[in-house]
Amino acid sequence: MDLSRFTRQADCEWRVEPFGRMRVPAVIYADAGLIEGMDDKVFEQLTNVASLPGIVRAAYAMPDAHWGYGFPIGGVAAFDPDEGGVVSAGGVGFDISCGVRAMLSDLRVDDLETTERKIELADALFHTIPAGVGSKGKIRLSREEMDAMLTGGARWAVERGFGAAADLERIEEHGRAAGARPDAISDKARKRQAGEMGTLGSGNHYLEVQEVAEIFDADAAAAFGLEKRRIVVCIHCGSRGLGHQVGTEYLRDMAIVDAELGIELPDRELACAPINSEIGRRYLGAMRAATNCALANREIIGHLTREVFADLFPGSRLDLLYDVSHNTCKVERHRIDGSTKDVHIHRKGATRSFGPGHPDLPRGLRETGQPVLIGGSMGAGSYVLAGTGLSEEKAFGTACHGAGRSMSRRAAYRRWMGRQVSDELFRQGTVIRSPSSRGIAEEAPGAYKDVRAVVDAAEKAGLARKVARLRPLVCIKG
């Protein structure tokens, strides 16, 4: 992407002043190298977002931004319903509430002292937690139970014996999105989800057993319970087939409404609806139900992971550090033009990053700030950061969510073979298990940006501060 199209505000902050139909500026938080490596579609999509009705302050892109559907992945925008603000299904994404859960083990890397032990753990996790396209678990829900799940989220899962009540304190929104409307979920979406609870899905979803390899902020690490060589489990997944179906159906319905209302869009992928319209309210209810599906799904997978660890390492513990979603639209209070008001924050492939003292954080994390969980590619490791107060001023309390793709899945599949990738990672000390050799090739480390550069840019921009780096030991991929 051509840097001359931007005005540099700081080392990792670049701005595009409004032109054409843009209502607000567009801002990208990244260093020069990351921006130059981004596709021109990121510029096009971000400036298109800045033209949507009711958008406030600016349209933002995170350091891991890349081409998405309508919004760039890594895109953030807030809309004021009192000013005709809209909700966009493409601005949330198809995998609604896809997110990351980090669990702290009391084990150390020495407890996985041999390659055979890592293989045993990898095989046990792979056989216990279904992964991949169309994967099915053992849980089957009646219509009444699915309604209860779509309303209750992780709380429903805990009440059914999956997980622990203590987990709810460490889950965004305490494990349940209020305002969910199961009645806004179609029969087709329900059918797609019928056997998918407790499953990982495909693409960039994963379950990784990691070790804390490096500490950057000793005080924050201690507050989070992170110390070198400690075992951490990170789970990345979302709302599976149900969320995808919700996104598909409401994008179609919103496009019809836009035509009826005369809403002119620069890209039909930005199909949206006024927040205060009937379809806007219905979509938000469906999206919140899909969010609860994702929260319940991660809680169940966390429970299954605990069972595997308890079987292989009797007496061991896996305590929840935090569970946070990407791909959401949430009502939050922020300062807009000198006054505090409720706005609808779209985060697509971006994660909340609330700073110290924020009232929405649990007491145990309020002094340090929210854990920001950033997944890297297989073999590259992941990061734990902490939210900052400056992030709330910069981008509505948001940071990046991962490394971000630098190459399409098709291009990656043409370049690498799955067996080649898994063998190389095995030589580096990471055991990979996946039902799909093609999926491994598509998710090869070389298909992603350098996660270190992305994390460094997020910190330099003030979106979050580095706490620890995690190195993968076992990776279960869809």
Image (spheres, rainbow, N blue to C red):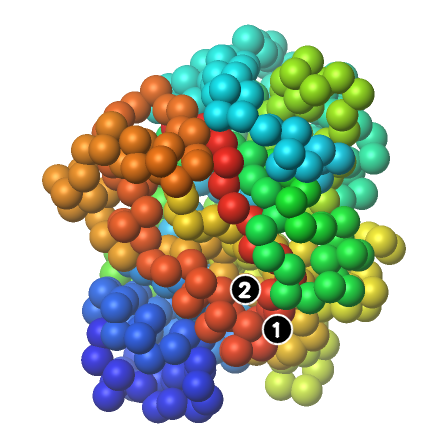
- Residue at 80% x, 43% y is 169
Residue type highlighted by circle 1: Ser
- Assess disc 2: are there few (<14), some (14-19) or many (≥20) residues with their C-alpha within 10 Å of its C-alpha: many
Q: Nearer the viewer, residue 145 or 316?
A: 316
Where does the image place residue 220, in percent across and percent down from the top left? 74, 62
Q: Quadrant of residue 42?
A: bottom left
Report helix, strand or loop for mark 1. Answer: helix
Which quadrant of the figure contains the N terminus? bottom left
Q: Is residue 375 left or right of residue 404?
A: right
Name the disc covering residue 399, or none. 2
- Residue type, label 2: Ala
Q: At 68% across and 42% down in the image, what residue appears?
A: 230
- Dividing the picture into quadrants, the one containing residue 62 is bottom left
For label 1, the crowd category at 10 Å Cα-Cα, with few meaning under 14, some 14 to 19 and many 20 or more, is many
Quadrant that contains the C terminus: top left
- Relative to the observer, which residue lies in front, 125 or 431? 431
Give the side of residue 438 with respect to residue 227, left or right: left
According to the picture, the residue beneath numbered tag 1 turns out to be 391
Q: Is residue 261 above or below residue 95?
A: below
Question: Horizontal placement of 124 versus 477: left or right?
Answer: right
**Measured from the top left, where is residue 16 in percent x and y?**
35, 84
Q: Residue furthest left?
A: 414
> How many numbered circles are shown?
2
Q: Which residue lies at the image location 26% right of the left edge and 74% below the top edge?
A: 36
Secondary element type, mark 2: strand
Residue 69: x %, y % from top left: 31, 52
The CA distance from mark 2 to mark 1 is 7 Å
Residue at the spot 68% in from the left edge and 87% down from the top edge: 338
Decide if residue 24 is in sight here: no
For the residues labelled 2 and 1, say whether their Cβ atoms are less than 8 Å apart: yes
- Return the x and y of residue 50 as percentages of the image width and height: 39, 73
Nearer to us in this view, 346 or 65? 65
